[in-house]
Image (cartoon, rainbow, N blue to C red):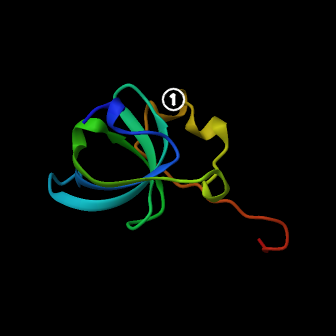
Amino acid sequence: MNKENFSPNSRYVVTWRNRDGRLRPANLYVYRLFDDSLIARMLDIDGLLHKIPYADIVRIVRQQTVPANMQFRVPAAILEEKNWKDRDIMHHYSSGPGVGK
């Protein structure tokens, strides 16, 4: 796979090769595309932000563009490439007023 196979603010069902080398299904919400990898939230595994190399994605099963009113929001600073140079996973959550601590 490569950058042209993906688009930001889209959901994908893919087959990917995990760190153990095993093929696994995954539901992704893609936030940002870099030259060699993408930043996505794993919707069905852990909900964390992951940097996934295109080479680890074996097959795209389904793709769905997300309308603007249904898109997940993350601060733009978190998605900058310089913040992902030395990490593969990032835990990020948001809260709002009245939700508690």
The quadrant in which the N terminus is found is: top left
Q: Which residue is more in the foreground, 94 or 26?
A: 26
Q: Residue at x 44, y 30 (%)?
A: 85
Q: Residue at x 63, y 48 (%)?
A: 74
Q: Is residue 7 left or right of residue 71?
A: left
Above or below, 21 relative to 78: below
- Looking at the image, the residue that sits furthest to the right is 98
Specify the amino acid type for callout 1.
Glu
The quadrant in which the C terminus is found is: bottom right
Judging by the rendered image, the residue that carries numbered circle 1 is 81
Q: Is residue 81 left or right of residue 88?
A: right
Q: Does any portion of residue 56 appear in the rendered image?
A: yes
Q: Dot 1, how many residues are within 10 Å of its Cα: few (below 14), some (14-19), or many (20+)?
A: some
Quarter of the image where one finds residue 80: top right
Element at label 1: helix
Residue 63 % position (x, y): 37, 52
Q: Which residue is more in the foreground, 56 or 19?
A: 56
Residue 60 % position (x, y): 26, 50
Q: Residue at x 38, y 66 (%)?
A: 45
